[in-house]
Amino acid sequence: HCDLPCYSPAGHRRDDPTLVGRPVVVGGSPGSRGVVASASYEARRFGIHSAMAAAHAYRLCPQAVFLRPDFPRYRRESDRIFAIYREYTPLVETVSLDEAYLDVTDQLGRFPSATAIARDIRQRVRDERRLTVSVGVGPNMRVAKAASDFRKPDGLTVVPPHRVLAFLDPLPVRRLHGVGPATEGALRDMGINTVGELRTQSLERLLERFKSHGRMLHAFARG
């Protein structure tokens, strides 16, 4: 799983060095009813996050630089980066402009492992596009996604099959795909805070509480 963290702020910062080290917010104007589309890590330290009202973001960090989104620009850059991915495998599943899954199971080519491919991708994106990509390597999509989130904004995490449960168990349940704030709150009410604690729950109990969604939670907690 390849993820370009803070994608739109990072692109603006790359093209405008005066933004380096400053809190950058991409989205609506603070003087309007607009919302935050994305925020740099410097801005996030003030509590700013996507979908927040731009006016509220300004109150939290008045020194932030507020930029209007430039979606054609983001699309062009995304196409260039995804073209790099497709040099390694034709099996690229796009999630968004900044996120994709790559299946390299039978596509190793000159590389000894998926980990070697991940290292090469990270280096090429850095050298050719001057951006960072966080990569997670795992035996399936859900594990790879959790792995790419592990060392953001600029990391590589490898989870081999025999280490899947050891990797997942200590993670907070919100790190699992499909666990949003509502599900996280419901699990907390059940005394479940980590993936390991979720894994101890019976399928019957999860189905009773979450209906068909419980089957997914049961499976994802097991990698």
Image (cartoon, rainbow, N blue to C red):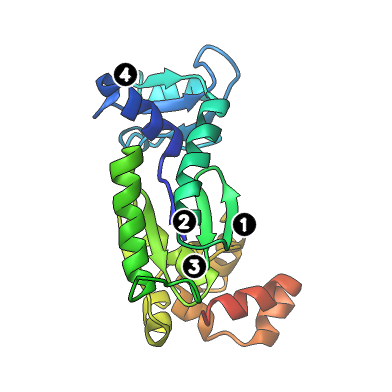
* Residue labelled with disc 2: 87
Q: Is residue 189 above or below residue 25?
A: below
Residue contact between numbered discs 2 and 1, judged by CB atoms under 8 Å: no
User: Disc count in the image?
Assistant: 4
Give the residue displayed 32% in from the left and 29% down from the top. 14
Spatial CA span between label 1 and label 3: 12 Å
Q: Earlier in the sequence, mark 4 or mark 3?
A: 4
What amino acid type is highlighted by mark number 3? Answer: Val
Other residues around mark 1 within 10 Å, as few (<14) / some (14–19) / many (≥20):
few
- The residue type indicated by label 2 comes to Glu
Question: Does residue 99 appear left or right of residue 63 in this picture?
Answer: right
Q: Earlier in the sequence, mark 2 or mark 3?
A: 2
Comparing 200 with 89, the one in front is 89
Q: Is residue 119 left or right of residue 168?
A: left
Give the SS element for disc 1: helix
Q: Earlier in the sequence, mark 1 or mark 3?
A: 3
> Three-letter amino acid code at disc 4?
Gln
| Residue shown at the point (48%, 63%) measured from the top left | 145
Q: In the drawing, does residue 104 fall left or right of residue 150?
A: right
Nearer the viewer's eye, disc 2 or disc 3?
A: 2
Mark 4 residue crowding within 10 angstroms, few (<14) / some (14–19) / many (20+) = few
Which numbered tag is attached to residue 63? 4
